[in-house]
């Protein structure tokens, strides 16, 4: 059983279509506690729980909903991210994390007037993998051996930049590691550059951004991106 929250209570709540309205504040409080006490075990327990509930189909989700992807525009932008976690994350864990951090957060407080009615409705991403609804928001995951792992398809919008206009026209590339205070090795930059050149040759260098350039309040994909490894990446293109 969970150490930091009432697992039985959460399991019951997750059966409700508006489960996130009851849980989101508690998750926020637990996150603050984890940060205050520098205790990543709390966050790990939450993610592990949600990953298991998703896997077991124990979370009330919508079977249909808005077609977000109808707003997809021609791709002319790349946004670079990092997971800010140790390498080796699975797509299942990533889906659980971004269900909580992105979809549940938005459904609890939609900020577009025309989407206010979504509050309290079951969550729907419109994205599926092997018959299961998924909630990861990146198109590509770059593993630490330089390999590429496809997540979203190019015709699917990733809720990743913190800016809907950018989301609609961009590809999200995420590095599978924590580069908060370091830079990726050169071979990883070469891998990113190869991916961009092969898959998205139409994207101009000036349209390649780090997440922090779109959403300045954050540091993703790391403090050294702008001064160190973005210039190196651009030179490789």
Image: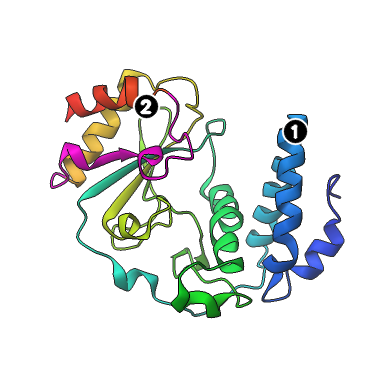
How busy is the neighbourhood of tag 1: few (under 14 within 10 Å), some, or many (20 plus)? few
Asked if disc 1 and disc 2 are in contact, CB closer than 8 Å, the reply is: no
Instruction: State the separation of the CA atoms marked 1 and 2.
Output: 26 Å
- Position of 11 with respect to 57 (left or right) is right
Q: Can residue 83 be seen in this view?
A: yes
Which dot marks residue 225? 2
| Local SS, label 2 | helix
In the image, residue 161 lies in the stretch drawn in magenta: no
As drawn, the label of residue 36 is 1
Percent coordinates x, y for residue 66 in the rendering: 44, 77
Residue drawn at (75%, 48%) of the image? 29
Q: In this view, does 152 lie to the left or right of 65?
A: left
- Visual colour scheme: rainbow
Q: Quadrant of the C terminus?
A: top left
Q: Is residue 203 magenta?
A: yes
Report the residue at 34% width, 27% height from top: 226
- Across and down, in percent, residue 218 comes to 48, 38
**Residue 42 in view of the camera:** no
Asked if residue 155 is positioned above or below residue 124 in the image, the reply reads above
Residue 34 rendering spot, x and y as whole percentages: 74, 37
Residue density around tag 2, few if under 14, some if 14–19, many if 20 or more, within 10 Å: many
Give the magenta part as a residue range. 201-223
Residue, x 51% and y 49% (percent of image)?
91
Toward the viewer: 226 or 196?
226
């Amino acid at each position: 059983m969970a150490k930091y929250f009432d697992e039985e209570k959460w399991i019951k709540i997750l059966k409700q279509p508006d489960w996130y309205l009851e849980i989101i504040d508690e998750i926020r409080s637990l996150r603050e506690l984890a940060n205050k006490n520098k205790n990543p075990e709390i966050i790990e327990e939450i993610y592990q729980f949600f990953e298991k509930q998703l896997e077991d189909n124990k979370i009330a989700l919508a079977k249909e909903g808005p077609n977000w992807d109808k707003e997809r525009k021609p791709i002319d932008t790349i946004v670079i991210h990092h997971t800010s976690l140790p390498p080796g994350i699975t797509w299942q864990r990533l889906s659980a994390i971004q269900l909580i951090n992105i979809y549940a957060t938005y459904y609890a407080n939609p900020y577009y007037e025309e989407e206010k009615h979504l509050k309290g409705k079951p969550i729907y991403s419109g994205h599926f993998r092997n018959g299961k609804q998924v909630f990861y928001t990146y198109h590509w995951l770059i593993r630490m051996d330089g390999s590429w792992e496809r997540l979203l398809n190019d015709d699917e919008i990733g809720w990743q930049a913190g800016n809907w206009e950018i989301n609609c026209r961009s590809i999200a590339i995420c590095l599978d590691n924590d580069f908060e205070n370091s830079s990726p090795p050169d071979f990883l930059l070469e891998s990113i550059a190869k991916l961009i050149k092969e898959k998205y040759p139409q994207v101009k260098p000036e349209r390649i951004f780090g997440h922090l350039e779109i959403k300045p309040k954050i540091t993703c994909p790391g403090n050294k991106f702008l001064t160190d490894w973005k210039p190196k990446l651009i030179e490789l293109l």
